[in-house]
Image: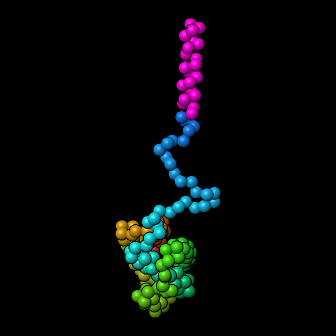
Amino acid sequence: MRTARSHLAPAGIAAVLALTVSATAPAATTVRPVAAPGAAAAPSVQAFHASGQDRAYLRQAHRGNLAEIAAGKAALRRSHDEDVREIAWRLIRDHRKLDARLREVAHRLRVSLPDAPSAAQRDDLDAVLARRSGHRFDRAWLRLEAGAHEQTLTLIRRELRDGHSGWVRDLARDGAPAVRHHLREVRAELDRHTR
């Protein structure tokens, strides 16, 4: 028995050591470059290149953000409905955040951005502002916002389908939940105003 144990003990220790070493050693198949401390991970080559679709998305989304901020401010001036005003505040806050990130990506990709909403967006807001304040204004404003957010979701889907830059696609993907949330809120409030 002693001889059997004495032969098994070294074999058992060797097996335990082999398992311990293999469990603590890094896997040979996972070789990843290590960034310097504090440095950001290197983006893919795709992130550095903006296709025509990416550039169009950045410009249109930027104009959309500017239009939403302007529309939110208009609602704060004209609406007396607390729910509409709350939606307007949220639109201003969220679209400012979305646009700050968009401007950062556009700067990295050297894409110039327009200074104002498109002429059509300004005309649409002017048509809503031509209505007096009160329920007529609120309904027209909510319809404008529903349409604008539907267009933005279409723009996002196109970028996710056809875009090239990883940075721009991430921007579109990350902005989609906020836009969908705005659309749900606007539609629910519009339903309340049309009853």
The answer to which of 25 and 115 lies nearer the viewer is 25
119 versus 56 height, above or below = below
Q: Count how many numbered circles sit on residues in the image.
A: 0
| Image position of 195 (left or right of 101) | left
* Residue 154, quarter of picture: bottom left
Q: Main secondary structure of the magenta part?
A: helix
The answer to which of 39 and 120 lies nearer the viewer is 39
Residue at image point 39% right, 69% down: 163
Of the 4 image quadrants, the one containing the C terminus is bottom left
119 versus 42 height, above or below = below
Residue at image point 57% right, 37% down: 24
Of the 4 image quadrants, the one containing the N terminus is top right
Which stretch is magenta?
Answer: 1-21
* Residue 85, quarter of picture: bottom right
The answer to which of 31 and 67 lies nearer the viewer is 31
Residue 72 in view in this figure: no
* Magenta segment includes 166: no
Residue at image point 58% right, 17% down: 9
* Magenta segment includes 3: yes
Residue at image point 55% right, 35% down: 23
Residue 31 place in picture, x, y as percent: 50, 48
Residue 170 place in picture, x, y as percent: 46, 66
Q: Residue furthest right?
A: 37
| Image position of 35 (left or right of 119) | right
Residue 87 place in picture, x, y as percent: 52, 75
